[in-house]
Image (spheres, helix red, strand yellow):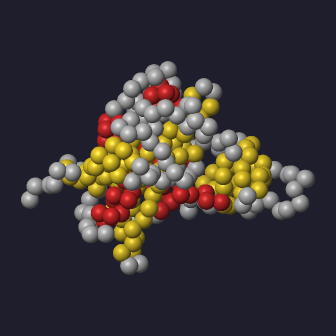
Amino acid sequence: MACPKECQTTMLWQHHHQPSAPSTNRLALDWLRHNVPQGPVLFTTDHQTEGRGQRNRRWSSEAGRDVCMSLAMPVQPDWRPSTLNMCVSLAVRDALTQHLPPSQSNGAVMVKWPNDILVWHGGEHRKAAGILVENVWRGSQWAVAVIGIGVNVNSNRLTRSYPAISLSEAWNVEFNPESITMGIVEHVIQQLQSSTEDVDLRYHDVLFGLNENRTFVVHERTWQGIFKGVNREGRGRFAWLPQPEMANQPPAEWLDSSEVQWCW
């Protein structure tokens, strides 16, 4: 039976595309209510109208100018959610470094815990891509990981208050969003099919802000501390600096990413 018009199949993955959609994660989750994937299934749109990021924040994109994609991956027996996050973050970062101009080193693209991708521009790192993983369960079994990825490719970001940037603004080149998407898909699939033995070491090699004195908001209070790294369960470790003016005890040494907000 031939695929419907909105569906294409390659040797590695099935691809569903819609010109406009609320979000690609929603497309994927709706599809998964009636289908069981036998391999990777990619969902893309040119215009995402209700994109979401971490902590249910809005993820904005410009129609036809950015990457809006979700990859549904059947879960393998040896996967762990924290390792999956590290693998996907590394894969997206590696895919974007393929487009670095000769004037910049690989250190120009970093991962901000847990999974934002930052690009160097004008003396600072700014957010160029974000990842939102949502999991599908069949009874008590983790069955499918829906990996939503948004990349600022050709959109205008530098005029906004949040420290974001697009690849074209950072590197002065117009990119083809579809080409960026396919490169990311290839890297994600390859990364998830590879050994995860040293993924935490490779993840730490490209972590933004590691061992730097920075300001964080934890449970609605501002603290000075040093981000020391991430364990295999995906929790961040912090060394909190003495703050005599604060009567409260400092936050715990180990925290989930949902408990910590970075101050720029």
Residue 254 visible in image: yes
What residue appears at the point 35 percent right and 52 percent down from the top-left corner? Answer: 21
Count up the numbered dots. 0
Relative placement, left or right, of 80 versus 73 is right
Nearer the observer, 60 or 212: 60
Q: Where in the figure is residue 36, as x and y percent of width and height?
A: 26, 67
**Residue occupying image coordinates x 51% and y 60%:** 82
Location of residue 218 by image quarter: bottom right
Vertical relation: 160 (above or below) 243 = above
Q: Is residue 220 left or right of residue 13?
A: right
Image quadrant holding the C terminus, namely top right
Extreme-left residue of the structure: 1
| 253 or 30, nearer to the observer | 30
Q: Position of residue 178 (x, y in %)?
A: 31, 38
**Rendered location of residue 84, percent (x, y):** 45, 57
Image vertical order of residue 80 relative to residue 176, above or below = below
Above or below — where is 16 with respect to 109? below
Where residue 79 sits, quadrant-wise, is: bottom left
**Res 164 quadrant in image:** top right
Considering every residue shown, the one lying at the far bottom of the view is 139
Picture residue at 87% right of the left edge, 56% below the top = 246
Q: Is residue 105 left or right of residue 216?
A: left
**Residue at 57% in and 31% down:** 159
Q: Is residue 231 visible?
A: no
Q: Is residue 252 left or right of residue 92?
A: right
103 up-or-down from 165: above or below: above
Q: Quadrant of the N terminus?
A: bottom left
